[in-house]
Amino acid sequence: MAKKRFVLSGYFGFKNFGDEAILSVLVNKLKEFNQSITVISSNPEYTKSKFKHIRSIYTFNLYDIIGAIAKSDFLISGGGSLLQDVTSLKSLIYYLLIIFIGLMFGKKVIIFAQGIGPINNPFGQFLTKNLLKHCTYVSVRDEKSRNLLNSWGINADLLCDPVFSTKIEHVEKTNSVAVQLRYFKTMNEDFIDRLALKVSTEFSDKTVEIYSFQDDIDLKICEQFQKSLNLLNPDIKTVLHSNLTDEEIISGISKSEYLIAMRFHAIIVGLISSTKTLAIDYDVKVQKIAFEFGLPVIDLKNDFGDKFQDLKKMNNRTASKAFDWNGFLRTIEG
């Protein structure tokens, strides 16, 4: 494959495990073909420190972004849930602006394994629909996104999440349960206390490894959970992990016997590492992946019922998917 220039746009540099893991998968695939890579990042120095021989430019330095895209052959937008306005309309407009710049310069634009929507703002819907119609290749990670695009007259490949392609070494399980929590608008102290009581009751003989995936969002909740756990059972051993690399997170969860997780990509790591996993339903994407793989699910409001017993009865099974690179590779080879 001839060497080409790629600009990668996504929620990169914020040290959010899922997006950084997707970036790793994408960069490693492009490096297989010795491609030139520039990543748009909120923390260019951090991003450059993660990967050898790539460039990185600041998220809000429009001059550098325009210059990099103008010199590129391809702009890749994704993965993750970039094109939605639940986070904010400004966020949606920002990622659409990057796509618009790519199209304006006549570049081939790839929408990479994204979850599209919800987009509630009519103007946001109009912009998204009309920009994506002009992209060279579009792929999404769920059926709902593909159906939405099909209703707009846009063809999209349906793929699994790229993190499913992460290779994990087989390791012996330790006597531990991993708990991964994040802030959410319906998160409350009652849920934290109920979860702490259940974990201290069901796993009093295990080390509770608590994971903050993105410290500015997760860490406070994780600290509250640890405090509640230790007040309920001063003898239980707890370890709070923060500011970890992707590799450290994957390694830690893969060694645990059990995982209780909110974040979508934490659940994927549990699935591909044969860790018995219970999902905390706070978002529709968590509902979908839990249903697809038959995982027990609890939510932030209701009683836990028998879900912890269901977790303990699970078999250690590796649930993985093969990420289909064919459409992507045909596009960049063309």
Image (cartoon, rainbow, N blue to C red):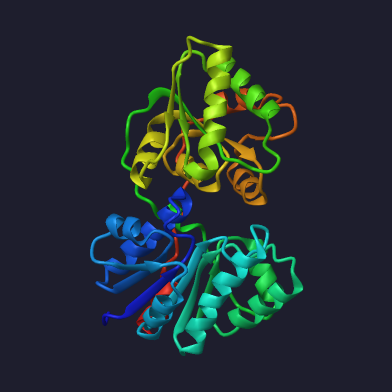
Instruction: Give above or below for 265 relative to 26.
Output: above
Which residue is drawn at the image coordinates 48% and 80% (left, top)?
Answer: 109
Q: Position of residue 315 (x, y in %)?
A: 50, 30
Q: Position of residue 139 (x, y in %)?
A: 53, 70
Residue 260 visible in the shown view: no
Percent x, y of residue 81:
57, 60
Left or right for 38, reference 314 = left
Q: How many marks?
A: 0
Q: Residue at x 37, y 31 (%)?
A: 255
- Quarter where residue 308 is shown: top right
Q: Going by the image, does 74 lie left or right of 231?
A: left
Q: Quadrant of the N terminus?
A: bottom left
Query: In which quadrant of the rendered image does the C terminus lie?
Result: bottom left
For the residue pair 91 and 282, the one nearer the viewer reads as 91
Can you say whether 90 is above or below 203 in the image?
A: below
Residue at 48% across, 82% down? 102
In the picture shown, does residue 144 fall above or below 332? Answer: above
- Residue sitting farthest toward the top: 235
**Where is residue 70 shown, x and y percent of the image?**
39, 85
Residue at left 43%, top 73%? Answer: 328
**Left or right of residue 69: residue 312:** right
Residue 254 at least partly seen: yes
